[in-house]
Amino acid sequence: MVSDCGRLLSELTGSTRIPAPDTTLLHGTATDILGMVTAYQRDGTKFLSSGDWVNALAAFWYGFGWLHFGAVSGYLKIPPGACPLGTPPERAPAWCSGQLQEKSVRYARLLDTARAVVVPAPEQGTVVHGAADRVLLITAVYAEQGTRYQVQGKAETALACFSYGHGWLDAAVRAGLFRITAERDLFTV
């Protein structure tokens, strides 16, 4: 359920910790990432409470992309527990199928464009460049999965994949792993 996804994101955000000392650059970046996760969780909750199921789904999954980037990168320490990635989203209410189709097609295009307009910022051969490559791989996997779900007529899962992948990429850009070469409006910088 989309509402369950929002509750889980809220619970995880509330119990996530920043392991780096307060005065470090890592702590500052982690605080920024966690702040963005919280913002997307709040946005999703507002969308859901106003009946905007599609934007709630997109916001929650985008937030999970940010959260998981932060955890995998070591900026955040999230508690173990349930993760929505293993369960496809619920079927959308019939009344929002047009909005869902439009948004999943648009988000596929936005993710493809975002992937095309970033280049790793760190020098080749460094650990951090390897991290940028890993983010590109993750975003490619979610773009491909989303496209496969679209073809299967599963627009909810497609939108979740595109949102999640874009969340990863956006967080990595914000953390300094990439330079943006065009289309800066696709990122929260």
Image (cartoon, rainbow, N blue to C red):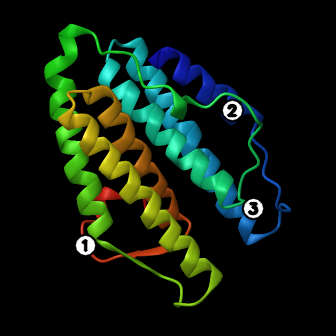
Task: Check disc 2 and give the amino acid type.
Answer: Leu
Residue annotated with mark 1: 182
Residue neighbourhood size for the residue with mark 2, other residues' Cα within 10 Å, grouped as few (<14), some (14–19), many (≥20): many
Q: Residue at x 58, y 54 (%)?
A: 69
Determine which of the numbered discs, if any, sits on residue 78 in the image: none
Residue placed most toward the observer, 76 or 105: 105
Depth check, front residue: 52 or 141: 141
Q: Disc 3 designates what residue?
A: 27
Q: Earlier in the sequence, mark 3 or mark 1?
A: 3
> Of callouts 2 and 3, which one flags the residue occurring earlier in the amino acid sequence?
2
Q: According to the image, label 2 marks what residue?
A: 12
Residue in the image at 15% along x and 33% along y = 102
Compare residues 79 and 175 and report the one nearer the observer. Answer: 79
Residue 71 is situated, as x and y percent measured from the top left of the image, at: 67, 52
Most extreme residue toward the right is: 21
**Residue 155 on image: x %, y %:** 25, 29
Q: Residues within 10 Å of mark 3 (few under 14, many from 20)?
A: some
Q: Is residue 88 left or right of residue 15?
A: left
Mark 3 secondary-structure assignment? helix
**Gap in angstroms between the C-alphas marked 2 and 3:** 18 Å
Indicate the position of residue 29 as horizontal and vertical percent values.
Answer: 65, 62
